[in-house]
């Protein structure tokens, strides 16, 4: 999100065309320069279009702020190295596709390119250095701006068999709806995606946007759905399924929870599919890195998922991974007197209740399938916290590397599974799982919560393993180092 300073307006560039959904939103086209004058929350900015001189709210994820690479903004992504590899490894991406992104090193950009080495698809990474004379990858070729550098390497190989072609294709991000309460008449139900004992999930559409619509099947489930909507409303992150709104009127109709639509469904269904079975060790690690990224955010918000498993992780069209299904989740702490606000609109009074009372309600029965339960969850739900999610992340890792294998598959009865969990019996190392990562998995299954890593530690260690598997940074021609 662009950093806003009331004394210095921020100039941003539009990454996509945007058509307003509400009267107070601003219309703009790709490459328009917008002047940010204020910000309302994490998802909406007030801006002026310098081309049309109109003002209004804009979604933050449709723009980028970076004056030094203005001519190459179509290739700019605010992503990490690992996230760049996720995008560039997407099936169907052409050789030579590239993106420019931040580097871990200060005042340096990185150029990530899809190429082939020995007939194997590889992602190569190049440092883009900045000097008083300009920008360069090779110190023998210095350019006034990044756009000139990119133009040069689209005509000349940056290394053997590696010539830039086009920027990595990007999909338009989901636009956050302004109102938490949606008009039921806006939602068109198209087809049933899934159903269970308590509810159904439908593919729906609001205007031209595909959405997922969840509704209860019975009156008793209505309150559970209302609590779930409140939880989803309180959080936002790119690796979490995005809450778009809720329908609560008329009261005679079932509540509808509207979220973004994940075309490839759940990870549990995707992994054993023909496309999922093609994924190699690196791709599977990249999936887990995305999950860890979302869970880091939840951990930072003292938000416990309590049901982290492949069935509740979802796959977008471009293989982007998002954690969803927050029906069992709870927030450990909430600032006092915090009203429920979604973007710029307050929820209706009947919906505006204090979150903490709902989040701290415990249930005597364990709704999470026992094979994913942590030892403390089997004994006392009040002891469940983010370290319990870490335990489940280890089990999820087993699912990922076995392409949907069932944990503790050697045990058919619940009692045997419970005994194995309470004794911290470790799941076997899957064939595709690197030994270094298996050590991380087993650390997740320590009996004492204090002995388990945090998600922040997990993500750091996971990315170190991903980078150690195959160092794809090419030599630094400036000083001969890597």
Image: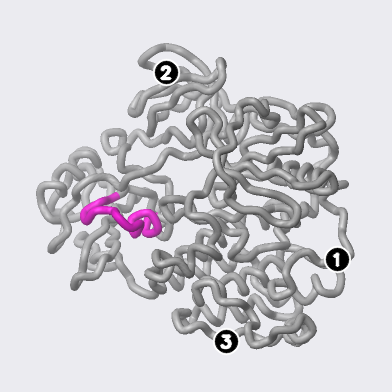
Q: Secondary structure at mark 1?
A: loop
Range shown magenta: 84-98
Alpha carbon distance from label 1 to label 2: 54 Å
Q: Secondary structure at mark 2?
A: strand
Q: Secondary structure at mark 3?
A: loop
Residue at the image position 19 percent from the left and 48 percent from the top:
165
Residue 106 x, y percent position in the rendering? 40, 52
**Relative to residue 392, is residue 86 depicted above or below?**
above
Residue 51 x, y percent position in the rendering? 36, 15
Residue at the image position 81 percent from the left and 67 percent from the top:
366
**Relative to residue 410, is residue 389 depicted above or below?**
above
Q: Is residue 89 magenta?
A: yes
Left or right: 228 in relation to 457: right
Residue ID for mark 3: 428
Q: Foreground residue, 10 or 337?
A: 337
> Which labelled disc corresponds to residue 49?
2
């Amino acid at each position: 999100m662009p950093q806003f300073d009331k004394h210095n307006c921020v100039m941003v560039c539009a990454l996509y065309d945007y058509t307003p959904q509400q009267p107070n939103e601003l219309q703009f086209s790709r490459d328009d320069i917008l002047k940010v004058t204020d910000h309302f929350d994490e998802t909406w900015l007030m801006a002026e279009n310098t081309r049309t001189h109109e003002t209004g709210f804009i979604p933050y994820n449709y723009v980028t702020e970076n004056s030094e690479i203005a001519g190459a903004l179509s290739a700019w992504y605010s992503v990490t190295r690992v996230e760049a590899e996720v995008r560039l490894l997407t099936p169907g991406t052409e050789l030579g596709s590239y993106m420019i992104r931040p580097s871990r090193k200060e005042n340096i950009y990185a150029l990530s390119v899809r190429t082939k080495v020995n007939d194997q698809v590889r992602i190569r990474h190049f440092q883009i250095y900045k000097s008083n004379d300009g920008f360069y990858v090779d110190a023998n070729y210095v350019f006034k701006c990044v756009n000139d550098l990119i133009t040069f390497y689209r005509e000349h190989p940056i290394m053997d068999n590696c010539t830039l072609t086009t920027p990595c294709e990007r999909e338009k991000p989901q636009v956050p709806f302004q109102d938490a309460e949606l008009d039921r008449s806006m939602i068109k139900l198209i087809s049933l995606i899934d159903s269970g004992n308590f509810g159904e999930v439908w593919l729906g559409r609001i205007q031209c946007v595909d959405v997922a619509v969840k509704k209860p099947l019975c009156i008793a489930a209505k309150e559970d759905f209302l609590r779930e909507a409140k939880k989803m409303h309180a959080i936002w992150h790119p690796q979490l399924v995005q809450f778009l709104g809720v329908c609560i009127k008329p009261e005679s109709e079932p509540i509808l929870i509207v979220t973004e639509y994940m075309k490839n469904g759940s990870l549990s269904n995707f992994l054993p599919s023909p496309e999922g079975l093609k994924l190699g060790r690196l791709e599977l690690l990249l999936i887990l890195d995305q999950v860890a990224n979302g869970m880091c955010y939840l951990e930072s918000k003292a938000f416990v998922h309590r049901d982290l498993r492949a069935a509740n992780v979802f796959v977008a069209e471009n293989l982007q991974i998002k954690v969803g299904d927050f029906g069992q989740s709870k927030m450990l702490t909430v600032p006092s007197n915090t009203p429920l606000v979604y973007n710029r609109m307050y929820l209706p009074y009947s919906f505006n209740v204090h979150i903490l009372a709902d989040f701290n309600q415990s249930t005597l029965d364990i709704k999470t399938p026992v094979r994913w339960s942590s030892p403390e969850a089997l004994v006392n739900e009040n002891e469940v916290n983010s370290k319990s999610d870490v335990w489940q992340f280890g089990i999820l890792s087993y699912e990922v590397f076995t392409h949907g294998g069932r944990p503790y598959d050697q045990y058919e009865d619940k009692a045997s599974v419970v005994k194995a969990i309470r004794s911290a019996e470790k799941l076997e190392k899957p064939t595709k799982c690197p030994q270094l990562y298996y050590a991380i998995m087993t650390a997740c299954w320590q009996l004492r919560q204090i002995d388990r890593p945090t998600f922040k530690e997990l993500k750091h260690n996971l990315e170190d393993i991903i980078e150690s598997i195959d160092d794809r940074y090419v030599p630094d021609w400036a000083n001969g180092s890597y």
